Image (tube, rainbow, N blue to C red):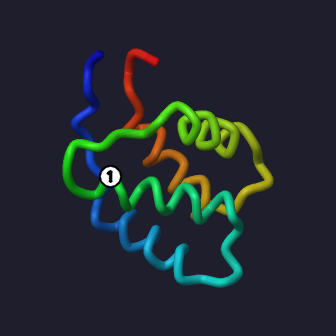
Amino acid sequence: MSKNAKQTSSRVATLAAETLQNDRSSQVAKSLAASALSQRNGDKQTGAKMEDVAARVLASDRYADETRELAASVLAQANKQR
């Protein structure tokens, strides 16, 4: 299985950290933020479950722009063969 070598940018990592610290952030946003931060360094990539969550967020217009940005970052780091 091929690996995706992309990593979370510093700007998205900052957004993810702010999301995790914000009590008003949704659970979905916090999950995406945690996934994005875990991929900041190293060779981790998005798992199938988070890939599905991120795809659903991007397909919906009910989420905030920040949540959608986190979803896009997480999805960009998914396994390309899945």
Q: Position of residue 76 (x, y in %)?
A: 41, 38
The number of numbered discs placed on residues in the rendered structure image is 1
Pointer 1 residue: 39
Residue extending farthest right? 62
Q: Position of residue 8 (x, y in %)?
A: 32, 54
Above or below: residue 54 compared with residue 52: below
The residue at the point 22 percent across, 42 percent down is 43
Please give left or right for residue 48 compared with residue 46 in the image.
right
Please give left or right for residue 40 compared with residue 55 in the image.
left
Above or below: residue 66 compared with residue 55: below
Q: Quadrant of residue 64?
A: bottom right
Q: Position of residue 14 (x, y in %)?
A: 38, 73
Above or below: residue 32 compared with residue 6: below
The residue at the point 54 percent across, 74 percent down is 19
Q: Position of residue 53 (x, y in %)?
A: 64, 42
Q: Please name whichever residue, 41 or 67, is drawn nearer the observer in this view of the structure.
A: 41
Q: Quadrant of the N terminus?
A: top left
Q: Quadrant of residue 5?
A: top left
The residue at the point 38 percent across, 22 percent down is 80
The residue at the point 69 percent across, 38 percent down is 56
Secondary element type, mark 1: loop
Q: Hey, what amino acid is under mark 1? A: Gln
Please give left or right for residue 62 compared with residue 71 in the image.
right
**Mark 1 neighbour density, 10 Å: few (under 14) some (14–19) many (20 or more):** many
